[in-house]
Amino acid sequence: MTGSAKPANKVARLLEVCDLSVEFRTRNGVVQGLDRIGFTVERAETLGIVGESGSGKSITTHSLLGILDRAGRITGGRALFEGFDLLSAPPRALAEIRGREIATIFQNPRVALNPIRKVGYQIEDVLREHTTTLSRDLRARAVELLKLVRIVRPEDRYHAYPFQLSGGMCQRVMIAIALACEPRLLIADEPTTGLDATTQKIIMDLIHDLARERQMSTILITHDLGLAAAYCQKIVVMQRGKVVEAAETASLFRNARHPYTQKLIKATPRLDSTLADIDVEPEETAGVEPAFIPATPKANGSAASEAVSNAPLLEVSNLRKLYRLKGDGALARWGRLAKRRFASAVVDDQDEWLAACDGISFTLMAGESLGVVGESGSGKSTLSSMIARLLDPTEGQIMFDGQDLTEIRAAAFSQRPERRLIQMVFQDPTESLNPRFTARDSIADPLKRLDGLRPGKALDARVGKLAAMVGLPAPLLDRFPHQLSGGQKARVGIARAISVSPKLLILDEPTSALDVSIQAMVLNLLDRLRHDLGIAYIFVSHDLNVVRLLCDRILVMNHGQAIELGNSRQILETPESDYTRSLIAAIPHFSP
C-alpha cells in the first residue's frame, strides 16, 4: 500500500462504515440501493451480513472495494479502513488496497476464475501484482498456498484448469488467491452456495481456521442463517438496502426484535422443522397471489395418495454410467484423479473406466418424492441426467410409465412426446437459461414447443400465473438473466419446468441459491403440487434438512454407488452407514 493509503496511527477498529448510501440509475428512474447503512468490524472478528436477494448485501461490499456497477453511485457516507476512507480514495490507492489489504472470495468460483488459465498461474498473477515475490519464487509460493488450503497433491493441481476441478476445489483455489497477500480483511460473498454439506463445512472451517491463525477479520455474506450462527460473532440483518438489526449472534437468535429478522429465523429449516413451521410469505412476493394451484391439506383422498397406490411410475434397474480414461487428454487425466478419490473403476485388457454411476436400482411411485443426497462427485447429477434422458446409460434399464426409456437414445428423446412428461430443474440457473431470453421468454418456451401455444393473451396469462406460483414478481419477467439475482433465476427455471404439467420432475439442487423465505415458499409450493396433481419428484440436494421436509424416501450415494435407501425419518434418525452420519453431522443449524 502507498503511504497515502495507510493511516499514520493505528486504530482499534479495523473497519467502520457510517451512513453509506448508494443509488442506481435505471430506465425507470433512480433506485435506492443502500440507505444510510452502518456497521463496524473489529480486528480478528467475523461479521455476518444476512438478508434476502436485493437487500443490499453485495452492494455494500462492492461499494467498499470500488467495484460497483456502472449505473451505481455512492451518494453519501464514509467507510474507514484503519482510519483511511475507502469511499473517497483515489482509484490507484484503492486498487492497491484491493487484493493486498482487503481480499474477496466471490459467490461462484467457476465464474470468478479464468477458464482458460491454469489455477497456479492465476495465483501467481496476484502475487506478481501485489507482492515483491521474485519471479523465480512465484511457482513455489503458489504451490505453498494450494497446500495451505488443503488441496491434495498441490503440485499436480497447480497445472489444472478450473473445469478439471470440483466446485469445492475451485472455491479452495479462490481462497488461496484471496490469502496470497495476507490481507487484514477477507470478504466471503456466499462462499459455499451450491456446495454439499460436507464440503461446505470443510470450506468454512478452513476460512475460520486461517482467519484465527492470521488474526484476520472476515465479513461473511450469506442467506444461510445456520452458517452465520455457526461462524460469526456478530450479525447484521439487511432489508431493502437498510440495516434493520445488528447484534451479537447468540443474542440475535435468542431474542430477535425486528419482524424481518424473526421471519428469516422462522423460514430457516431446523432439525425439528415441518413445512408448516417454515411457511412464511417472502418479502418480494407480498401481494402476489398463488395462481391456479390451490393449497390443500394432506388427506387420504388426495391425488397423490391415489396415485401412490398404483403401479410404479419409474423403475430403475442396475443403472451404470462408465467413462473411458484411455489416453493423455484432459478428461483422462481428470478421470484418473477423480477415480482415486471419488469413484470405483473398471479395468479391462485395454482401458481404464471411471464409474460415475455404478449399479443403482430403485422404484418411484406416482406422486412420491425421492431425495438423492451425497457429496460432490457421488454421482447424483449423473443419475438424474440419465433418468431425464440427457445422458445414455452404459448399462441398466429405466422403465417409465411402463415404457423402457433406455431404448430411446438421449439425442432423440427431445423430439419424443415423452419429453414433456419428464422435466428438470438444473443446479446452475445461470448456465441453464438462454442469455438472450427474457424471463418471460424462458418460461414461455416449453409452452410454445410442447403445448403448441402461440404468442398472445393466453400464453401471457399462463406465464404470469407460473411466475406468481414461484414467487417471481411480474416486473421481472421482462429482464434478462444477467439482470436477475441467483435466486430469481432459479425461480425462472422452476416455473419453466412445471409449465407443461410433467409426471416426473427432477430437481437438481433447486433451492441451493434461494433465500430462506423463498426456499420455504418453493418447498411448500412443490409439496402442494405433488399432493394436488400427483407429480413425482427426484429431489437432488446437499441439504438434508430440506430433503427431510419434502421427501418420503432418501437415497444416499457415494462413489457412484447407493449406500442407503429407505424412509426419510429412519435414515436421518438412525442411519446405518458412517458416511450418512458424517453428512448429517455437517449440517449447520441453530436453536433459537
Image (tube, rainbow, N blue to C red):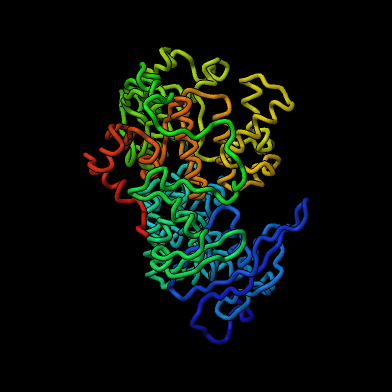
Q: Quadrant of residue 491?
A: top right
Of the 4 image quadrants, the one containing the N terminus is: bottom right
What residue is at 37 percent from the left and 31 percent from the top?
Answer: 370
| Residue 182 image position (x, y, % from top left) | 47, 69
Q: Quadrant of residue 254?
A: bottom left
| Residue 560 image position (x, y, % from top left) | 34, 33
Q: Is residue 8 left or right of residue 543?
A: right
| Depth order, front residue of 131/275 | 275
Query: Looking at the image, how many numbered discs can be counted on the residues?
Result: 0
Q: Is residue 68 left or right of residue 211?
A: right
| Depth order, front residue of 125/382 | 382
| Residue 149 image position (x, y, % from top left) | 40, 58
What residue is at 36 percent from the left and 38 percent from the top?
Answer: 373
Question: Does residue 337 appear anywhere in the picture?
Answer: no
What residue is at 58 percent from the left and 67 percent from the top?
Answer: 98
Above or below residue 417? Residue 66 is below
Of the 4 image quadrants, the one containing the C terminus is: bottom left
| Residue 51 image position (x, y, % from top left) | 53, 57
Above or below residue 35? Residue 588 is above
Q: Is residue 271 left or right of residue 86?
A: left
Q: Is residue 571 left or right of residue 294?
A: left
Question: Does residue 314 appear anywhere in the picture?
Answer: yes
